[in-house]
C-alpha cells in the first residue's frame, strides 16, 4: 500500500513516483493507493497514477485508489479507468 497526503503538486511528483514504483514488485492481487489525506492532486500526478495502473494491469495486479474527497473523485472520474473504493479492506476481506 502507498499512502499519500497533503498537497500533491508537481514539486512532489518525484517522491510519488518512487512510492508508486514500490508497487511494481507486486504480482497478482490488489494494491492500494490511499488518497484519503490528499488535499490537492495536480493533474500531472493523475498521469503518474494512470501509468502505475497500466503497469499494474500488465502484471495482473489490480490497483485500487482509496478516496473520499469530492474534488479528487471528480478528477479521477473524468480520467476514468480507476477502481475507487472508500475504505481499505479489513483483516477478513
Image: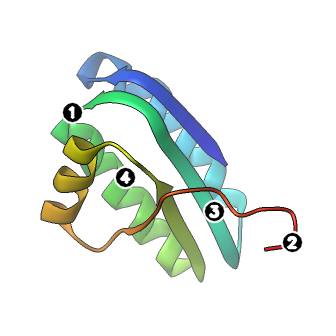
Contact (Cβ within 8 Å) of mark 4 with mark 2:
no
* Residue 34 in the image, given as x and y percentages of width and height: 54, 45
* Residue 48 in the image, given as x and y percentages of width and height: 33, 47
Q: Which mark is residue 49?
A: 4
Residues under labels 3 and 2: Cα distance? 16 Å
Q: Name the foreground residue: 52 vs 69.
A: 69
Instruction: Kindly identify which residue carries mark 2.
Output: 92
| Pointer 3 or 2: first along the chain | 3
Contact (Cβ within 8 Å) of mark 4 with mark 3:
no
Q: How many marks?
A: 4
Instruction: Kindly identify which residue carries mark 3.
Output: 31
Choose top left, top right, bottom left or bottom right for residue 88. Answer: bottom right
Instruction: Kindly identify which residue carries mark 1.
Output: 42
Contact (Cβ within 8 Å) of mark 3 with mark 2:
no
- At 35% from the left and 59% from the top, the residue drawn is 51
Mark 2 residue element: loop
| Pointer 4 or 3: first along the chain | 3
Residue 23, above or below 8: below
Mark 3 residue element: strand
Mark 4 residue element: helix
Residue 80, above or below 65: below
Residues under labels 4 and 2: Cα distance? 27 Å
Residue 76, above or below 83: above
Amino acid at each position: 500500500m502507498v499512502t499519500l497526503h497533503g498537497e500533491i503538486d508537481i514539486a512532489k511528483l518525484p517522491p510519488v513516483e518512487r512510492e508508486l514504483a514500490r508497487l511494481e514488485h507486486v504480482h497478482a492481487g490488489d494494491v492500494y493507493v490511499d488518497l484519503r489525506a490528499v488535499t490537492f492532486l495536480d493533474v500531472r500526478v493523475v498521469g503518474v497514477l494512470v501509468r502505475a495502473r497500466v503497469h499494474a494491469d500488465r502484471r495482473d495486479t489490480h490497483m485500487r485508489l482509496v478516496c473520499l474527497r469530492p474534488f479528487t473523485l471528480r478528477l479521477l472520474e473524468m480520467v476514468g479507468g480507476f477502481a475507487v473504493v472508500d475504505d481499505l479492506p479489513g483483516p477478513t476481506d
